Amino acid sequence: MENSIDVSTLLRFDSPKDFSSRRAYQAEIDSSVHQLERILGGYSFGKDNYTQCGLKGCRTLHGKGYVVQTLDGIETNIGKDCGTRHFGQRFEDLEGQFTRLVEESARRDRVQDAIRQKDATVQKTVTLLKDCRSWEAEVDRLFKELDRESSLISVLRAAMRTDGALVVDRQLSAAERELSGGSQRYIRETVGRLYGLSVLGMKKVSIELQAEALVPLHELSDDQLSAMSASAIRTKAQWLSELEATLLRAESYIRSAREFCSQQNWRTFSQAFDAGRHKTTDRGRAILKRLAQQTPV
Ligand SMILES: [Zn+2]
């Protein structure tokens, strides 16, 4: 049944004239005489265009409503809530069909737009994919370098748990100890903050971009749309929403990766080991030096 819905029958009404000028239009009908065939379209007008209801017994000024067609081909406009009042279940069934038709039409437009913008979206996705891949490689390189030294990676992992804060337990001076009442020996201090650590918890965005965005984008074509059933269009429209989210995720990944790899980040990290705040080895110090001096990507 789904395929029998023809969205081309939907009419658009931008002002009351659009329906009142139609040949079959009547300003008033009697719902006890006429039965409904279908809803031709909906309308929603501003105050200046409120229109008198076409149902005898109502004749109220309505801003929102439907243009309906009767079994004998007469058309009129009725208020949004008047249909059920005057025609009961028959109207509710028609309204349900009409709503599905409007939704399907919107989905079809959405897919059509996507086809029209395909080249630009492919271009954008290819660029994002290239950027994601190079940032992934850079993040990976940095992480592996840190992972060679347990004293470094443990500080990084601790920062991941504290939203990037680099926390050290500093021994109190004698004077500070006295002030604190004598029992406390250490104080917890944040000595800096790392940015972009969220990239470490993210799955490979490039794989998602390739499989969920680029491959299905290439498959999108005009021929496909004309052959598509309503349910296939629904699936495509759903994928388009996910595509937007996928592209946003890729952009967000790149922003975070840029922060993660920034020279500033690794200078801050290195400073957390200055003056013995955190302990590391000679190898750790050599790695820190390299990271803090690296040229930003
Ligand atoms: Zn009415």
Image (cartoon, grey):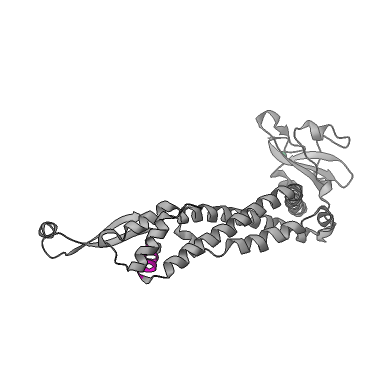
Task: Give the image quarter of residue 238.
Answer: bottom right
Counting every numbered tag in the picture gives 0
Name the side, left or right, on which 170 lies relative to 287.
Answer: left
x then y, percent, for residue 220: 77, 56
Q: Residue at x 17, y 60 (%)?
A: 172
x then y, percent, for residue 143: 46, 65
User: Is any atom of residue 194 visible in this view?
Assistant: no
Q: Is residue 162 above or below residue 6?
A: below
Q: Is residue 202 above or below residue 223?
A: below
x then y, percent, for residue 178: 10, 59
**Pick the front one: 295 or 238:** 295
**Pick the front one: 11 or 161:** 161
Q: Quick check: is 83 in the magenta stretch?
A: no
Q: Residue at x 33, y 54 (%)?
A: 192
* Quarter the N terminus occupies: bottom right
Q: Residue furthest top?
A: 48
Query: Over which residues does the magenta segment extend?
Result: 151-159
Q: Residue at x 55, y 65 (%)?
A: 203
Name the side, left or right, on which 190 lies relative to 62.
Answer: left
**Pick the front one: 14 or 24:** 14
User: Is any atom of residue 4 visible in this view?
Assistant: yes
